[in-house]
Image (cartoon, rainbow, N blue to C red):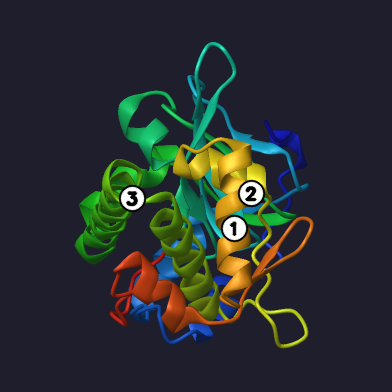
Amino acid sequence: MPDYESINPARTKCDACPLRRLNQFREFSPDELSFISSFKTGELNVDKGATILVEGANSAHLYTILRGWGFRFKILEDGRRQILNYVLPGDLIGLQGSLMGEMEHSVEALSPVALCVFERDRLQNLYEKHASLGYDITWIAAREERILDENLLSIGRRSALERAAYLVAFLHQRAIGLGISSGGHISIPITQQHIADTLGLSIVHTNKTLRKLSERNLIRWRERSCEVLDLEGLLKISNWEGLSGVKRPFI
């Protein structure tokens, strides 16, 4: 877990937050922005591969991803890992631990991550005085449930090829909305092991499946990343309509 003594004063002021410039996020009212600015207590930088939150632990903080990629996961006693979902800028993490008493999953950084830090004890104040922000948190939780529903459908009913196509298309579309690119290309920072642990496949089966997508010129696979070449082709294979363009909240 991160060293909470390393939490820095807020370097990114909420009124100048780069996420607010993105079309996919709704705008704050002046009162909401003022509260969020006071709610935020600092920022935390986490290295790639570091565990941000640990299953079974309590945390005094909530976090919003400001920059970087991460993923939520659970591990069985024998070490097998199931990746539940991926987190990107604008996503709130730690809410489950705040409401349930302890985390029931862990969160790891896929890349260097910058986090906005919020005091968990002030969450009740948010619900009491800012009903619109309370609704936003409910919306965020419902959206997470919807994503998990789609992931469960993939594992339970989609073929291996359909599962892989859906996952890569999903991550690619999320990155597009956030303007995440390098040299004009979107590089998804995942390994074949991450995909195997998300889709419930063996690493051998995952390798064969990704090779099929590559041979169809749908993706370009690199050592530790993936690039989408044909999004429409991936959507067609996965039988998925893609993400909606509805504006979403963030804290």
Residue at image mark 1:
210
Q: Quadrant of residue 184?
A: bottom right
Q: Residues within 10 Å of mark 1 (few under 14, many from 20)?
A: many
Q: Earlier in the sequence, mark 3 or mark 1?
A: 3
Residue at image mark 2:
207
Relative image position of residue 223 (x, y in whole percent): 79, 57
Q: Secondary structure at mark 3?
A: helix
Q: Is residue 60 visible?
A: no
Depicted 203 relative to depicted 18: above or below: above
Q: CA distance from mark 2 to mark 3?
A: 18 Å
Looking at the rendered structure, the kind of residue marked 2 is Asn
Q: Earlier in the sequence, mark 2 or mark 3?
A: 3
Q: Is residue 120 visible?
A: yes
Q: Residues within 10 Å of mark 3 (few under 14, many from 20)?
A: many
Q: Nearer the viewer, mark 3 or mark 1?
A: 1
Looking at the rendered structure, the kind of residue marked 1 is Leu
Quarter of the figure with the C terminus: bottom left
In the rendered structure, the answer to whether residue 85 lies left or right of residue 204 reads left
Q: Nearer the viewer, mark 2 or mark 3?
A: 2
Relative image position of residue 33 (x, y in whole percent): 42, 73
Quarter of the figure with the N terminus: top right
Residue 182's disc number: none
Residue at image mark 3:
154
Q: CA distance from mark 1 to mark 2?
A: 5 Å
Q: Quadrant of residue 204?
A: top right
In the rendered structure, the answer to whether residue 191 lies left or right of residue 63 reads right
Looking at the rendered structure, the kind of residue marked 3 is Ser
Q: Residue at x 53, y 80 (%)?
A: 176
Q: Are marks 2 and 3 in contact (CB under 8 Å)?
A: no
Q: Secondary structure at mark 1?
A: helix
Q: CA distance from mark 3 to mark 1?
A: 16 Å
- Total marks drawn? 3
